[in-house]
Image: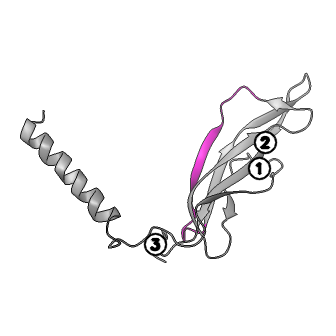
């Protein structure tokens, strides 16, 4: 449990950290040029197959986040199992986002299954302080 003095010291330390990282032009900007923006890759037919898929950011931009959407194909519906997320992270040099998921879609009464469609998304930005040390 915090004492009153400990709590005050924590608040003061937090304010000092915020001031040091955001004030007076002494801290380097997180990014320069184009602000963070989301890019969307093409629909990958059957891409929810558990294999890794990569969406690269435009040249000289870094991936700061990412995700995906799954969709059933024409005339199909999702299977009852939840989407199994195996990977969702930046690639090794931070220039794109990798996703590997499993999700089935079904066709007809007999339940013919196949991997659902996959669309990747990445949040990209330019910056001198990119995740790969750029």
Q: What kind of element bears circle 2?
A: strand
Query: How many numbered marks have been drawn onto this rendered protein structure?
Result: 3
Horizontal relation, residue 110 to residue 53: left or right? right
Q: What kind of element bears circle 1?
A: loop
Q: What kind of element bears circle 3?
A: loop
Question: What percent of the width, then of the height, locates residue 116?
Answer: 79, 41
Horizontal relation, residue 114 to residue 109: left or right? left
Evaluate if marks 2 and 1 touch, with contact meaning CB atoms under 8 Å apart. yes
- Boundaries of the magenta span: 79-95
Give the spatial CA distance, label 3 vs label 1: 32 Å
* Colouring convention used in this rendered image of the protein: one colour
Say whether residue 80 is magenta: yes
Is the residue 112 above or below the residue 42 in the image? above
Local packing at callout 2 (Cα closer than 10 Å; few below 14, some 14-19, many 20+) is many
Placement of the N terminus among the 4 image quadrants: top left
Residue at image mark 2: 115
Give the spatial CA distance, label 2 vs label 1: 7 Å
Q: Earlier in the sequence, mark 2 or mark 1?
A: 1
Say whether residue 111 is magenta: no
Q: Earlier in the sequence, mark 3 or mark 2?
A: 2
Residue at image mark 1: 47
Question: What percent of the width, then of the height, locates residue 57?
Answer: 66, 66
Is the residue 55 above or below the residue 27 in the image? above
- Residue depth check, mark 3 versus mark 2: number of the one nearer the observer: 3
Is the residue 90 above or below the residue 67 in the image? below
Question: What percent of the width, then of the height, locates residue 64?
Answer: 54, 60
Q: Residue at x 45, y 67 (%)?
A: 30
Horizontal relation, residue 130 to residue 58: left or right? left
Q: Earlier in the sequence, mark 3 or mark 1?
A: 1
Is the residue 46 above or below the residue 98 in the image? above
Residue at image mark 3: 129
Q: Depth check: give the residue in front, 42 or 86.
A: 42
């Amino acid at each position: 449990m915090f004492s009153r003095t400990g709590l005050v010291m924590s608040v003061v330390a937090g304010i000092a950290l915020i001031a040091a990282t955001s004030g007076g032009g002494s801290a380097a900007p997180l990014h320069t040029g184009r602000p963070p923006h989301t890019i969307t890759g093409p629909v990958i037919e059957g891409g929810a197959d558990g294999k890794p898929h990569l969406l690269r950011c435009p040249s000289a931009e870094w991936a700061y986040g990412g995700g995906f959407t799954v969709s059933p194909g024409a005339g199909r519906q999702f299977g009852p199992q939840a989407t199994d997320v195996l990977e969702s992270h930046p690639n090794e040099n931070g220039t794109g986002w990798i996703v590997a998921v499993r999700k089935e879609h079904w066709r007809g009464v007999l339940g013919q299954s196949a991997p659902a469609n996959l669309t990747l998304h990445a949040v990209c930005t330019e910056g001198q302080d990119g995740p790969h040390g750029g």
